[in-house]
Image: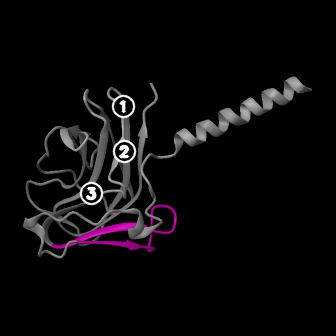
Amino acid sequence: MKHFTLIGILGLLAGCSSLCLAQPLNPDPGFETGQSGWGKPFVPADSQNRGCTLAFSAEDPHAGNLCAVMSSESDSRFAITPKGGTINVLPGQTYAISIWSKAGADFKIHPKTPGFIIRVDMLKGTQQVESLYIDASGKVSGTIGHDGPVIPDSWTQVKGQVSVPDGTSRMRVNIFFWRASGHLYLDDMAINPVND
């Protein structure tokens, strides 16, 4: 009987550790805490007077009760980052980054721009080591591409993988509204290590 109890406890612990490992590294992946789970939007000088706004909506989230809504009145760029800003990472480790996105009826990507991009900054302390970009199709590149893919008006998952270069100890993931206008809906962001 003790043998079966021990096996049962070990199985329970293994199941719990798998669940814990499956939790995203980023806080508030579903935008459920609204602004309190996200840092103040970063708005570059060239977009300061263009109505860049981060809001949270209960209307048609992908899952849960809320989704984020990034919007702008005209051709602009700005970013949001999970509260806390950076995540501890290991050189050589690969991380999967995903988010669900949906274009509003008025969302317009301006010519020769991606419209939406995930920028992943690899850092050593506060010093930048490298930046990688994931476009709406999931393509990962060291540069911001031109003419990004059309962002559907229904919930679509954007996902890509990045590998941490040597000399990197922290990673910051920025969700960018990039040279677009109108409304872009976002939900269920996840940053997870990829198991080899």
Q: Nearer the viewer, residue 190 or 75?
A: 190
Three-letter amino acid code of the residue under disc 2: Ile
Q: First in sequence: mark 2 or mark 3?
A: 2
Q: Quadrant of residue 1?
A: top right
- Asked whether 33 falls inside the magenta stretch, the response is no
Horizontal relation, residue 114 to residue 168: left or right: left
**In-image side of 22 versus 178 (left or right):** right
Q: Which residues are magenta?
A: 53-73
User: Residue 121's spot in the image, x, y percent?
Assistant: 23, 44
**What residue appears at the point 13 percent right and 63 percent down from the top-left corner?**
44
Neighbor class of circle 2 (other Cα within 10 Å; few <14, some 14-19, many 20+) is some
Which residue is disc 3 drawn over?
Answer: 151
Residue occupying image coordinates x 77% and y 33%: 9
Task: Tell me the crowding category of disc 3: few under 14, some 14 to 19, or many 20 or more residues within 10 angstroms, Cα based.
Answer: many
Rendered location of residue 25, percent (x, y): 44, 46
| Element marked by disc 1 | loop
Of badges 2 and 3, the one in the foreground is 2
Q: Position of residue 144 (x, y in %)?
A: 14, 46
Separation of residues labelled 1 and 2 (CA atoms) = 10 Å
Q: Earlier in the sequence, mark 3 or mark 1?
A: 1
Tell me the number on the disc at residue 87. Answer: 2
Q: Amino acid at mark 1?
A: Leu
Residue 164 lies in quadrant: top left
Kindly identify which residue carries mark 1.
Answer: 90
Frontmost of labels 3 and 1 is 1
What element does badge 3 sit on?
A: loop
Residue type at mark 3: give it: Ile
Residue lying at the far right of the rendered structure? 1
Considering depth in this image, is 123 or 142 the residue closer to the camera?
Answer: 123
> Which quadrant of the structure image shows residue 170?
top left
- Residue 60 lies in the magenta-colored region: yes
Q: Say what secondary structure mark 2 lies in.
A: strand
